[in-house]
Image (cartoon, helix red, strand yellow):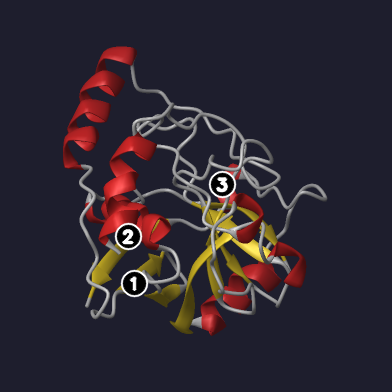
Amino acid sequence: MKRGIIKIMALVAAALMAGTVLMGCNNGSTETTSTEESVQESQLKDKYELIELDENTVYFADIDIKGYGKIIVKLDQKAAPISCANFVALANMGFYDGLTFHRIIEDFMMQGGDAEGTDKEGIAPMIKGEFSANGVDNPLLHTRGAISMARRNSPMDSASSQFFIVHKTYPSLDGNYACFGYVTDGMDVVDKICTEAEPIDNNGTIEKEKQPVINSIRIRT
């Protein structure tokens, strides 16, 4: 476990994320000025802290979605230590608060955590892709309720802040994306969001005003 965490600091020092991941991104805009953005980004970056997650501790993420309720996720830091550490760091700094699920496809997945076009742009670093196609032994499968890191098609080490929750089991994702946990409660929320979604294209893009809002993501043990 320590070996994986030690490598994280070098990995996160790479270029910061700014673009598409897993077949789509949110193209929202921001009205904040560049000066305001610099102050806000600096404040958020100061809060970003990677910690070593205890192998023997069970970590849960409570994802509170406005108007829908909570999705409870159990993280698996043994299978995906880097993905979990990054997700916990972002959640602990309040990075996800106010972001949305911008891409939803029924019977596939719901994707969120995109900071593009907000005052959080450029805060989240790119991390190692923890999946077999990238040389990492991660046994977790993309079954219904899996949570996994979204990424660009290339390079493979391009996951950042965006994640997705699998609505229906999707084997073709196995070995190509870093699954890092599973929903233990709140699949009814996932079902409601996915079945009610009204994407405007085949890529699952949801209109800005209709994107489910993440009130908060809180980590607990």
* Residue for badge 3: 209
Q: How many other residues sit within 10 Å of disc 1, few (<14), some (14-19) or many (≥20)?
A: many
Q: Quick one: quadrant of the C terminus?
A: bottom left
Q: CA distance from mark 3 to mark 1?
A: 23 Å
Q: How many other residues sit within 10 Å of disc 2, few (<14), some (14-19) or many (≥20)?
A: many
Identify the secondary structure beneath mark 1: strand
* Residue for badge 1: 62
Q: Are marks 1 and 2 in contact (CB under 8 Å)?
A: yes
Q: Earlier in the sequence, mark 1 or mark 2?
A: 1
Q: Earlier in the sequence, mark 3 or mark 1?
A: 1
Three-letter amino acid code of the residue under disc 3: Glu
Three-letter amino acid code of the residue under disc 1: Asp
Three-letter amino acid code of the residue under disc 2: Ser
Quadrant in the rendering for residue 61: bottom left
Residue 162 rendering spot, x and y as whole percentages: 50, 49
Question: Image point 69% across, 41% down: which residue?
Answer: 153
Question: Image point 23% across, 36% down: which residue?
Answer: 44
Identify the secondary structure beneath mark 2: strand
Q: Earlier in the sequence, mark 2 or mark 3?
A: 3
Residue 16 rendering spot, x and y as whole percentages: 42, 29
Res 124 visible: no
Compared with 37, 83 (above or below) is below
Q: Nearer the viewer, residue 102 or 92?
A: 92
* Residue for badge 2: 216
Compared with 145, 94 (above or below) is above
